[in-house]
Image (tube, rainbow, N blue to C red):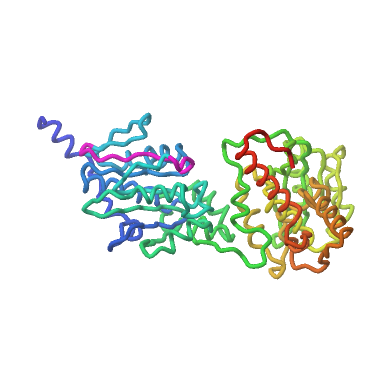
Amino acid sequence: MTWLAALRDAAQPQRPQWRDIARPEQLPPPGNWLVWAYIAGRGAGKTRSGAEWCIDFAQSVPGCRIALVGRTPADVRDVQIEGESGIIACSPDDFKPLYEPSKRRVTWPNGSMAIAYSAEVPSQLRGPQHHAAWADEVSSWTDAPKGDVVDTAWNNLMLGLRLKSPLGTRCFVSSTPKANQLTKQIMAKRTTVITRGSTYDNLANLSGSFRDQVLAAYEGTRIGRQELNGELLEDVEGALWTPQMVEACHMKLEDAMPDLERVVVAVDPSGGSGPNSDEQGIVVAGKGVDGVFYVLADRSCKLTPQGWASRAVAAYHEFSADRIVAEKNFGGDMVVSTIAAVNSSLRVTTVNASRGKVQRAEPVAALYEQGRVRHAKVFDVLEDQMTSWTPQAGGSPDRLDALVWALTDLSGGMGQGAAFIAAWRMDLERRGVEVPTQSRSWRDRIPRDANGETVGDRMRRVRAELKAAQEVRGGTPDRA
């Protein structure tokens, strides 16, 4: 190196050591642990912690093999490897790795390697062996609701962590928690050490727009405790929806939206427009040609009557809806006239809340339990209301009310399958099977025969028997 190059290098600002600037919860805990789980809110610095930990492991154990596992291949590439806080960006200049995307491999100068895997393809992790692993956002992995069972991504990853190293076998987990089986199992194991963080811990390193958007969306909500504070939210006793039900209804990026037979905009107007009044719930939903119901948008707001009506009409045109469904308990005909003042040519159907909220919502919750409703995206505030509202809580769940009105209209007023349940009930009564009239929930009202089977149970059993018989003798089973 010439004296000029040395002088130039000396003039460059020295990058601070990670241990000098990291917060305590971002550094590996002491002790003989198998899993270090950094559970924190969005933007808390989980990715930087994972990248720095991998780099330190790669330097300390030359020639080691590290598994990088993310929710999708794009997540591993764009966040863990090439992200602003990823492995390439955080590796020091004298220890920069070579990234070979076609081989899904990152190789450091000392021979240490990190191999990329997608949790969407658990079979990728069958066979390969590793000294260490970085499992990112495990709560959002496709098979996380199944837990640690055979042939899931987590199970295959753990079985492959069998190469010895001077530092021991290690796995770093970085995730915003969700109350699914895998997250609970990881956090409950005695071999897991947990450190926690929140979005607020890292605000100084986040952009102003991120702070404004994320905090405005989540602060003061139950889901904010998860997304900002990194809390594991358990099911709310008495709520009709569980976090697992809502998580299961989210459409993936690769899922195609079918043609929609109908689209409605449901409006739940509040009793006023002042600063202390409730929001106006405005939810757009449609029924697909596949018989599934799709929640397309949540346009809820807190505006004047003219403001929310304009917003509902705009959603009507944006989604080519065939009608607006509006609750008329607040203001009666005023709701229709307010919408007509914005556009008088739209078809508006008014509904009256003659039944209690629970009675209206139960058939809709049943649709979710049956897997008949999909959300086109994550609707944070709406889903917060779905999983937290109970009859005992009181108040007006405006967005939830609008959702219930939309799906009730699309499903014919009682929820998909209600007509079949009524037919089952009549058939069973004709055959002398006792049908309970008093029940604690919608599940208790489904008729069952003497063996405790519903019609659906019986059909599934018959199909399974036919399929088993077909596998034995070959051929095509008759339709049940």
Is residue 268 shown left or right of residue 228?
right
Q: At 62% from the left edge and 52% from the top edge, which residue is drawn?
A: 246
Residue closest to the eye, 351 or 211: 351
Whether residue 185 appears in this view of the structure is yes
Residue 402 visible in the picture:
no
> Residue 81 placed where, x, y %?
37, 39
Which residue lies at the image location 85% right of the left edge and 39% below the top edge? Answer: 346
Q: Is the C terminus in the top left, top right, bottom left or bottom right quadrant? A: top right
- Work out whether 11 lies above or below 272: above
Percent x, y for residue 204? 40, 53
Q: Quadrant of residue 203?
A: bottom left
The residue lying furthest to the bottom in this view is 392
Residue ID at (48%, 57%):
183
Is the N terminus in the top left, top right, bottom left or bottom right quadrant?
top left
The x, y position of residue 164, in whole percent, is 25, 51
The tally of labels here is 0
Which quadrant of the figure has residue 437? bottom right
Highlighted range, magenta? 109-123
How far across and how far down the image is residue 424, in percent? 82, 54
The answer to whether 366 appears left or right of 175 in the picture is right
Q: Nearer the viewer, residue 435 or 258?
A: 435
* Viewer-proximal residue among 74 and 337: 74
Q: Is residue 296 magenta?
A: no
Task: Please tell me which residue lies in front, 273 or 437.
Answer: 437
